[in-house]
Amino acid sequence: TDEEMSDDNMSDDAMTDEEMSDDAMSDTDMVDEHIPTTFTVTITSNDAGTELPTPLAPGAYLVHTSMDTLFVEGTPDRDEGLEALAEDGDPSVLVETLQSVATVSSAGAFTNPDDGSDPGPALPGSSYSFSFDAVPGDYLTFATMFVQSNDWFFAPASSGISLFDGETPLSGDTSSLVRLWDAGTEVDETPGEGPNQAPRQAGPNSGEDQDAAVTAVPGFDGAITVTVTVG
């Protein structure tokens, strides 16, 4: 009987230790699954290979889990700051709005070109870069003005760019995932010529207002290059 009790105790102890070990492994796995990965994105305005080289303006980025956080294709702008970014290259209102959205884990502005120390446009041949942390399930959206326009901007589709394929982080040239969009907030003029476009307008928000849907703009392939690096 003593031997049976001893065996039972040993068995119970062994099971308890094993269970504790499994719990510890489970806890460790859970922690590992949520270690953030650091990404750096570089957006370059190309000075060749496109029909109209254009400066880029300071822009905004967000890391999010919900869809259509910045805009919805085919519906008008929400008046949350995208208009100021697309018309005048001012991301400040948009960033402030995004920072209060529950499904946005981080949001910020990129304002200084990589070859400069002060805020300003990234001229053809120059770029902007920004970094952020993300975990599986996160998406990236950003927007930067096509400066030679009234209200066009570069951005991914409204769903954003998935930052992970399973557990594997995204890296490399992601230019094919970015499109040119018309914010629908100002009447369009010929790109590169309009008197109400940022390089030639008298002041911010100078053009004729419009209340149209956000739509994709065809053409202008190769205007920008977008690369993502990890670490």
Image (cartoon, helix red, strand yellow):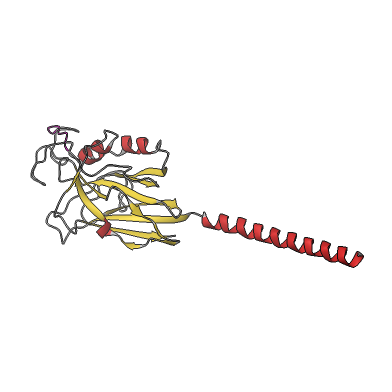
State the residue at coordinates (15%, 42%): 199
Question: In this image, 4 relative to 112: left or right?
Answer: right
In the depicted structure, whether residue 205 falls above or below residue 162? above
Q: Vertically, is 15 above or below 150?
A: below
Q: Quadrant of the N terminus?
A: bottom right
Residue 219 appears at what percent x and percent y? 13, 55
Residue 65 drawn at (x, y percent): 40, 47
Q: Assign the C terminus to one quadrant of the image.
A: bottom left
Q: Quadrant of residue 213?
A: top left
Tell whether 130 sits left or right of 175: right
**Residue 184 point in image, percent of width and height:** 17, 39
Judging depth in this view, the residue of 88 and 73 nearest the camera is 73
Q: Is residue 211 magenta?
A: yes
Rendered residue at 89%/67% (across/down): 3
What residue is shown at x 28% (from left), y 44% (from top)?
Answer: 58
Residue beneath the point at 65% across and 57% down: 23
- For the record, the magenta segment spans 207-212
Task: Tell me the chief SS of the magenta region.
Answer: loop
The part of the image, by quadrant, that contains residue 84 is top left
